[in-house]
Image: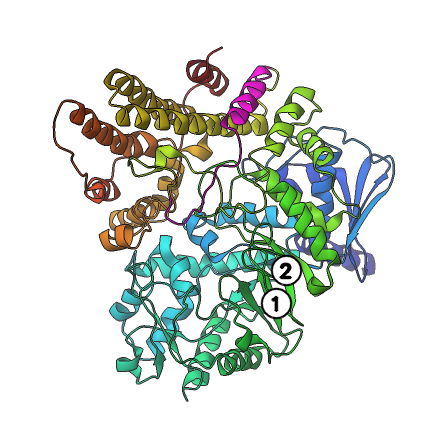
Amino acid sequence: MKKQLFLLITLLILPLALVANPIKGLLERIDKGASQKFIIEQVKSNKDFFELDQRNNKVVIKGNNYVSIATGLNWYLKYYAGVHLSWNGMKAKLPAQLPKVTKRERHETNMNLRYDLNYCTYSYSMAFWDWKRWEQEIDWMALHGINLPLSVVGEECVWFNMLKKLGYNKEEINKFIAGPAFLAWWEMNNLEGWGGPNPDSWYTQQEALQKKILKRMREYGIEPVFPGYSGMVPHDASEKLGLELAETPLWNGFTRPAILLPTDPRFEEIANLYYKEQEALFGKANYYSMDPFHESKTVGKVDFDAAGKAIMKAMKKVNPNAVWVLQGWSENPRDEMINNLKKGDLLILDLFSECRPMWGIESLWQREKGYGKHDWLFCMLENFGANVGLHGRMDQLLSNFYQAKTNPIGSEVKGIGLTMEGIENNPIMYELMSELPWRDEEVKKEEWINNYTSARYGANDETINKAWQLLGKTIYNCPRGNNQQGPHESIFCGRPSLNNFQVSSWSKMKNYYDPKSTEEAARIFISVADKFRGNNNYEYDLIDILRQAISDRGRVVYNHTIADFNSFDKSSFEKDSKEFLNLILLQDKLLGTRREFRLGSWIEKARRLGNTAEEKDLYEWNARVQITTWGNRECADAGKLRDYAHKEWNGILKDFYYKRWEAYWKTLQDQFDGKPEVIIDFYAMEEPWTLAKNEYSSKPEGDLINTAKEIFSEVFGK
């Protein structure tokens, strides 16, 4: 009887043990049956570490927690099995017999906090994600050592409940809360209501989604960073609630929420209500993100010291052990706000450490004394607006990172952060950044690149190494002093003019590499295309590198065309303007071969979240507006937001960007024939596209390798 009872208890406990170990689930999602090939062991340690070893025919992965173990798994897959999991592919077919770990390998780090995401990422990349996509992302985080991600899904649900209790009705609340593609800037106190009103079902599904996200994060031992309360209220809260507010100016044409002054008697009451509603939905957190007065140089007569203390007091009331996470960006954090806060209560994200570090070393945004006594993280921003383009600052990243580890001014650095505005691009930079905390010796760029290519393609190929070494010296090595925001922008995506250089008004782009380098890299890549046919990572990179080469060629042809016009060379203008338009169509065709570069992938995700035709149309409108005009006419033109989130994607190239350029070249062509100059109202051309409902598919078209070869030959010659 006792034996039978023991067996029954064992059978009941066993499934719980399997569920409790998220690494087994991760392995099964990578490759069904893969969990049987590994031995996973969690070992107590006061340091984050992972260890690779062998026991008979199984690979042993040890670590002090599940995130460390997942990091070790990723290390093994890359550097032993030649399997690289990234945003373009999170599944793999592992060999029946895994390569053996012939010598025990151990890595540890004292950079214990490894942060991920930016508010902008949630709108530029994640606005329309479902649970399946989120599950993959949490796996990606764990594999890359992330243990502290920003977690803001469903934040609008907290606010809906809070504002309702403050006396706002549903219509008023929905005029305040932004639509799905613009929630990030509402959360950052930049705008109200744009993109809404949201249907009731939106709140229901986002609440349920966040609960699934948090459950999985907590299974891994990942600490979510919740949005905290720092005083944001609707701009009419003075009349509605009788509050004392700091009026905020327009943000690029948008009405901003107001700021409730911390000295107002009701600040503590409203903060308490916010945290109560958040806890009721999602529980408590140990980290809360707040960026008061974000991108706002004029906020009236604010006592920043009092503001900092009031914000901290409200957060500590909900969790005495909580830490305030604050972005190091522009004028934030203001010294007056943080000087009198206790050490250990604040964690500052040095948001753009690879380019404009604020923590102490020389840069455009240098703070001579850094962040003083406060803890901070060395962060890589990398991408703005989720723009498409090869980009990186490899030398600067490595130099600044190692200075941060040794410079006394930066002595309070506690880890790293990935703070990109958009993801699913430039996997090489995220692999490099996420590995740095785990490497004892300084990384040598050239050696690391060769190891990366072997891992990414499952083969050590000298030809591919040559291409990546070239890219590592050129487009992935944006130099110190160049402060551009993200990738070199595609000329195809810019509003046409006689002086097109930057696409976004905010890019600060400057030339720093020879466009012939991307052409040569594409040529080298294509030379081994048949050898790597069917290799998912190779095919993704081939399209991305060739896309960049064509984009760079487009900039050259554009300048030729403008020179033709200025020289009144009609025949050359006709030839070069025709070549430019043809390049856009060829680029559109090339990008149609990969799901990741198709507008249809973005639109389909948006429509899929809708439950009714009306909801689907609202979400599609959000998706279309964000990547084009960004706002209404005033915000797009006077506010200079149009094309900030431009996308060099199949579908939008042909139907949106091509038509702008075709119309513009026609106005110049007409001037050769003596017709007067015509000033195009581009917004009038663009808005109808944002309102359209024509279908875009996510399904790839054409043979990828053959298409790439044909297009390369047509653009660059054999």
Q: Which numbered marker is on residue 605?
A: none
Q: Residue furthest bottom?
A: 265
Q: Nearer the viewer, residue 659 or 96?
A: 659
Instruction: Judge whether residue 68 can be spotted in this image.
Output: yes
Q: Is residue 489 above or below residue 401?
A: above
Name the colouring of the figure. Answer: rainbow
Instruction: Judge whether residue 17 can be spotted in this image.
Output: no
SS for dot 2 = strand
- Identify the residue shown where x is 67% and y is 36%: 33
| Residue located beneath label 1 in the image | 347
Left or right of 86 in this view: 653: left
For the residue marked with disc 1, what is the amino acid? Leu
Q: Find residue 311 and report its horizontal and vertical position in percent.
A: 51, 78
Q: Residue furthest top?
A: 718
Q: Find residue 458 and report its horizontal and vertical position in percent.
A: 68, 27
Query: Do tag 2 and tag 1 residues touch (Cβ < 8 Å)?
Result: yes
SS for dot 1 = strand
Location of the N terminus by quadrant is bottom right
Report how far apart the C-alphas of labels 2 and 1 lie in the structure.
7 Å
Magenta part of the chain = 504-530
For the residue marked with disc 2, what is the amino acid? Leu
Q: Nearer the viewer, residue 683 or 705?
A: 683
Q: Residue furthest front?
A: 567
Left or right of 227 in this view: 584: left
Q: Earlier in the sequence, mark 2 or mark 1?
A: 1
Magenta run includes residue 507: yes
Left or right of 62 in this view: 190: left
Q: Find residue 53 and report its horizontal and vertical position in percent.
A: 84, 41
| Residue located beneath label 2 in the image | 377
